[in-house]
Image: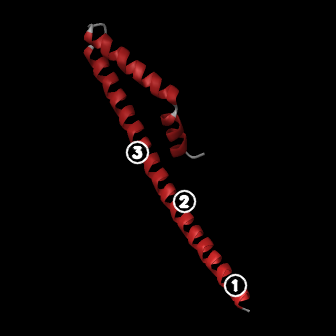
Amino acid sequence: MNTKEAIIEIAQNPKTGHVVAGGTLTNGVGYVLGMIPDDIGKLGTLIGAVLSITLIYVHIGKFRADMRSRAISDEKSKIEMERVRLEVASLKEKLNAKKND
């Protein structure tokens, strides 16, 4: 597993999402209540935003890969259906030829 795959796996982990969401929520509430200094609150918000953007990017990439995979699968199915249709037509011709003999 290379570094990119490891990062994607971590980003797609639901536990990571829950931790980021919980941390961002806690940070935001603490900031609003004045329990967290301004700099730490801004840094936490920035980190949460960066992680959220990363998750969105990963999910869009996964969606696009799934769409390409589905398109290839659909094309293969169409080719297979056409091959079977031609084979059935050939068998019908042979059957009709035998009936006419």
Height in image: 80 above or below 8?
below
Dot 1 falls on a residue whose secondary structure is helix
- N-terminal of the two: label 2 or label 3? 3
In-front residue for pair 62/92:
92
Front-most of 77 and 25? 77
Question: What crowding class fits label 3: few (fewer than 14 Cα within 10 Å), some (14-19), or many (20 or more)?
Answer: few
Spot the residue most to the front.
Answer: 100
Q: Which residue is mark 3?
A: 60
Q: Is residue 60 above or below residue 99?
A: above
For this view, does 52 lie left or right of residue 19?
left
Say which residue appears at 27% left-offset and 19% top-offset: 39
At label 1, the amino acid type is Lys
**Looking at the rendering, in which quadrant would you find the N terminus?**
top right
Residue, disc 1: 94
- Secondary structure of the residue carrying tag 2 is helix
Q: Considering depth in this image, is 95 or 36 the residue closer to the camera?
A: 95
Q: Which residue is mark 2?
A: 73
Position of residue 22 relative to residue 85, above or below, is above
Which three-letter amino acid code belongs to the residue tagged 2?
Ser
Q: Residue 5's spot in the image, x, y percent?
A: 54, 44
Question: Gap between marks 1 and 3, in whole Å?
Answer: 51 Å
Percent x, y for residue 16?
49, 27
Decide: is 85 above or below 51: below
